[in-house]
């Protein structure tokens, strides 16, 4: 199936509508009994699945049944669906007959949301179906919608079609009204007095990752100035949340090297890292003017599955990327 700009715009709107439905379902479920969110429902090769994840999975399947165009048969790849398990819409469509592959993370940042600590994000992206060869670089439409804490009145939604820029909306959860806002990644040419960090969310590998991060700032000449307290660290346990922070100008650099650390230390903790569904909305940051790439500076090329570990770096602008790349390449050789 050949797509045109009008069809891709329709696909963007569909992904946004899906996420609004999911967000509203979760808000209702939390009001009716949010304490159950934190119960463990299953443990898979991809991640630990909590009760809140099961609620979202059911909502997504129901939405696709009701709303996805039958003329666009689609395969779903998502957390909670094991590799090798085929989920297609219309139901029963052979994967070979689908025209799109849709990769989703219903709740990226589950731990934030289930403890009502910080927003999580619903992530979704669409790529023309290339079977098992479909990869992150094939994604042409992406959307992410904020899943807010109970005290929030505002939830943001940002989405993009490749080559056509970004759509950003503020949703007033009290009234249902929406209004656009402008995405502005930071234009800063340096890191001083700004937020930038390497992911080290869990105890595994934290010492090694912190050593690499400190070495990075030392090589860039940041340490030693004003006691070295010139770069701020904010560990947002959500890859989608990290992409958002870069896109709106809060952070200047964020990166995730956990798979490298786990391999170096022989920890075997592949489930505690970024997967393709976590980073599937990188297109949005790219369309906003930011950079998402491998630590070596290459495009992300992971296959659209639920288990592949993904190592990535994100920058608010090309100048920051050019500053970090050569230093990071040297550190990768030294530490990993």
Image: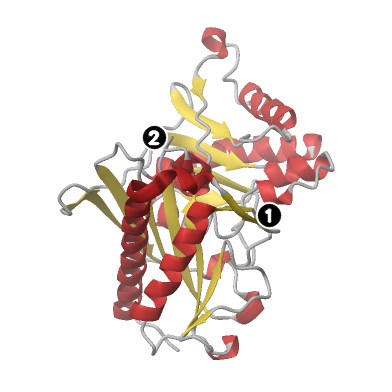
User: Would you identify the image quadrant in which residue 244 lies?
Assistant: top left
Residue 156: % across, % down: 30, 49
Work out whether 151 lies above or below 238: above
Between label 2 and label 1, give the one nearer the viewer: 1
Residue under label 1: 309
Q: Mark on residue 331?
A: none
Instruction: Judge from the rendering whether residue 202 lies leftward or rightward of residue 11; answer left or right.
Output: right
Q: Residue at x 54, y 55 (%)?
A: 279
Colour convention: secondary structure
- Determine contact: label 2, label 1, CB under 8 Å: no
- Residue lying farthest to the top in this orientation: 227
Q: Position of residue 72 (x, y in %)?
A: 42, 85
Residue 63 picture location, percent across and down: 37, 72
Q: Quadrant of the C terminus?
A: top right
Of label 2 and label 1, which has the lower sequence position?
2
Query: How many callouts does the rendering have?
Result: 2
Q: Nearer the viewer, residue 213 or 324?
A: 213
Q: Secondary structure at mark 2?
A: loop
Give the residue number, with chain letter if any, for mark 2: 250
């Amino acid at each position: 199936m050949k797509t045109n700009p009008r069809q891709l715009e329709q696909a963007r709107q569909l992904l946004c509508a899906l996420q609004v439905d999911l967000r509203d379902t979760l808000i209702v479920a939390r009001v009716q009994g949010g304490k159950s969110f934190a119960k463990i429902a299953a443990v898979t090769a991809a991640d630990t699945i909590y009760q809140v994840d099961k609620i979202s999975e059911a909502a997504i399947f129901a939405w696709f049944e009701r709303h996805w165009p039958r003329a666009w048969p689609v395969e779903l790849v998502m957390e909670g669906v094991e590799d090798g398990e085929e989920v297609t819409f219309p139901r029963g469509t052979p994967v070979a007959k689908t025209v799109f592959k849709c990769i989703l993370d219903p709740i990226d940042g589950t731990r934030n949301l289930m403890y009502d600590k910080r927003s999580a994000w619903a992530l979704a992206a669409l790529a023309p179906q290339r079977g098992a060869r479909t990869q992150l670089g094939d994604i042409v439409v992406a959307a992410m919608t904020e899943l807010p804490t109970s005290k929030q009145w505002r939830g943001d939604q940002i989405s993009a079609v490749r080559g056509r820029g970004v759509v950003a909306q503020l949703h007033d959860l009290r009234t249902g009204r929406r209004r656009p806002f402008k995405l502005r990644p930071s234009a800063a040419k340096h890191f001083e007095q700004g937020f930038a960090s390497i992911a080290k969310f869990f105890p595994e590998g934290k010492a090694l990752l912190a050593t690499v991060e400190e070495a990075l700032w030392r090589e860039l000449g940041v340490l030693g100035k004003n006691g070295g307290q010139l770069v701020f660290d904010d560990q947002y346990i959500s890859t989608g949340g990290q992409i958002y922070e870069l896109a709106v100008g809060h952070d200047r650099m964020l990166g995730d090297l956990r798979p490298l650390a786990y391999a170096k230390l022989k920890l075997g903790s592949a489930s505690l890292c970024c997967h393709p569904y976590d980073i599937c909305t990188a297109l949005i940051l790219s369309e906003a003017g930011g950079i998402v790439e491998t630590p070596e500076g290459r495009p992300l090329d992971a296959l659209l599955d639920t288990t592949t570990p993904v190592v990535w770096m994100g920058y608010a602008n090309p100048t920051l990327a050019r500053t970090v790349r050569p230093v990071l390449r040297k550190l990768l050789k030294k530490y990993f």
